[in-house]
Image (cartoon, grey):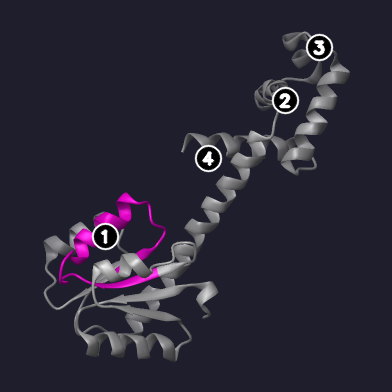
Amino acid sequence: MSEAQGMVYIVDDDPSLRDAIGFLVGSVGYASCACESAAELLRRIDESQPACLVLDVRLQGLSGLELQRELTDRDSPARIIFVSGHGDIPKAVRAIRHGAVDFLEKPFDDQMLLDRIGEALAASAEELRRRASRASLERRLGGLTERERDVLRLVIGGKTSKSIAAALDISAKTVENHRHNIMTKAGVASVAQLIAWATEAEESAAG
């Protein structure tokens, strides 16, 4: 896996463990970045690419759980796998509830860690795709004129061109022209696609 496809960040204050995990993930083609503290991770993480953190619970400075909270607060798309020699049930439950992919106790099974890393990177990539799609939808929605937005709302409501024309006090031909412009801006080829696009755009804006 190239850096463009994703990065595994290994955050642990034990250099030998950082090296061991780095070797493990590199052996199956993952790119990795070793960090000895939460502060270093926050300086180095690239959140524009899929990211997975293999994160120790106990760190100098910010703890792993505090780092998780910091990343959540900044709406990071990165996904976290906790590893710890001091793991206990309350910490594991807290980590999972706050979105961690898993909580593995040291020594952990290498294949299990690799499997979880694959899941984490896939989830991070999907989140980035979702955000890019939402941004694209919002840009296209923002390109509509006020009248086009009026027409679009009525199209979504299932209104015919004739009823839209009556509601907006314009001609049916003008409605058709607006609808054509909306479809061109939205990049869709049918009214059904337009309705699906508009619905998704509205949901994205609301979310």
Which residue is drawn at the image coordinates 50% and 60% (left, top)? Answer: 126
From this viewpoint, is residue 60 visible?
A: yes
The amino acid on which the numbered mark 4 sits, given as a three-letter code, is Ser
Is mark 2 in CB contact (under 8 Å) with mark 1? no
- Tell me where the magenta segment starts and ends, as one range: 52-81
Which residue is drawn at the image coordinates 14% and 78% (left, top)? Answer: 85
Q: In the rendered view, tell whether residue 87 sits above or below residue 138.
A: below
Is mark 4 in CB contact (under 8 Å) with mark 1? no
Q: Residues within 10 Å of mark 1 (few under 14, many from 20)?
A: many
Residue 67 image-quadrant placement? bottom left
Mark 4: secondary structure: helix
- Residue 148: mark: 2
Q: Which of marks 2 and 4 is nearer the N terminus?
A: 2
Q: How far apart are marks 4 and 3 (CA)?
A: 30 Å
Residue 153 image-quadrant placement? top right
Which residue is drawn at the image coordinates 62% and 47% (left, top)? Answer: 136
Mark 3: secondary structure: loop
Instruction: Find out whether residue 55 is within the magenta segment.
Output: yes
The answer to whether residue 34 is left or right of residue 190 is left
In this figure, which residue is indicated by the disc labeled 1? Answer: 68
The amino acid on which the numbered mark 2 sits, given as a three-letter code, is Glu
Residue 158 image position (x, y, % from top left): 69, 24
Mark 1: secondary structure: helix
Q: Earlier in the sequence, mark 4 or mark 3?
A: 3
In this figure, which residue is indicated by the disc labeled 4? Answer: 204
Residue 5 image position (x, y, % from top left): 53, 73
Q: How far apart are marks 2 and 1 (CA)?
A: 43 Å
In this figure, which residue is indicated by the disc labeled 3? Answer: 170
The amino acid on which the numbered mark 3 sits, given as a three-letter code, is Ile
Mark 2: secondary structure: helix
